[in-house]
Amino acid sequence: MKNILLFSFLIIVIISIFFSSPTSALATSEAAGHGGGYLKEMVFKIINFIILVGILAYFMRKPVKKALKERKENIEIALEEARRAKEDAERKYQEYEERIKEVDREIEEIKRSAKEEGEMEKERIIAQANDMAKKLKKQAEWMAEQELKQAKAKIRKEVTQATIELAEKLLVQNISKEDQKRLVKEYVEKMGAL
């Protein structure tokens, strides 16, 4: 930055000298009464210009070269940084793309797994319900059989009781005292044999 300010100041001074020299030389030659020096004036301008270019080239060569070199290096550094930043951005972009793909795969896997688990749970619940229905049916059949057996036993008992009562009535009406004694005797003998 300091070199650029020095360079600018030097250019302004040299340009000021360049433009002021021919004018003062022209003014002096006309004041002295020499009016025919157009060629002379042109030669002075060319010499002044060559001197100016030489001085500028001498003093400005190193700062300009240095400034251009620094500018070139800065541009190269900036390009390298931009290239690295681009590579980093592309790498991060690829990483994010991979992460997104991985997340999508995980989501699909979770959906598939949840669906499979749901189907398995559904099958398990259906199987459990079928087992429960079979057990309830068997239990109901067993209970119905038990009730049927109890009802049959109760009916048999009632029929037997009614038959006994009817038989007693018939026996009492139709049996004689001798038959009664004989039956009691047979019954006692059978009981004694046991």
Image (tube, rainbow, N blue to C red):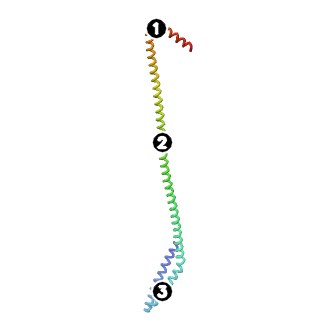
User: Residue 133 versus residue 160: which sits nearer the camera?
Assistant: 160
Q: Earlier in the sequence, mark 3 or mark 1?
A: 3
Q: Earlier in the sequence, mark 1 or mark 2?
A: 2
Kind of residue at badge 1: Ser
Instruction: Name the spot of residue 134 as percent of width and height, x first.
Output: 47, 35
- Find the distance from the CA under tag 2 to the CA under tag 3: 106 Å
Q: Quadrant of the C terminus?
A: top right
Q: Earlier in the sequence, mark 2 or mark 3?
A: 3
**What's the mark number on residue 176?**
1
- Which residue corresponds to the image point at 43% horizontal and 12% vertical from the top-left? 170
Q: Is residue 155 above or below residue 127?
A: above
Is disc 1 surrounded by few (<14), some (14 to 19) or many (20+) residues within 10 Å? Answer: few
Contact, mark 2 vs mark 3 (Cβ under 8 Å): no
Instruction: Name the spot of residue 88 as percent of width and height, x first.
Output: 52, 62
Residue beneath disc 3: 46
Kind of residue at badge 3: Ile
Kind of residue at badge 2: Glu
**What's the mark number on residue 123?**
2
The part of the image, by quadrant, that contains residue 39 is: bottom left
- Which residue corresponds to the image point at 51% horizontal and 60% vertical from the top-left? 94
User: Residue 99 versus residue 186: which sits nearer the camera?
Assistant: 186
**What's the mark number on residue 77?**
none
Q: Is residue 167 above or below residue 22?
A: above
- Find the distance from the CA under tag 3 to the CA under tag 1: 183 Å
Instruction: Name the spot of residue 83 as percent of width and height, x first.
Output: 52, 66
- Callout 2 secondary element: helix
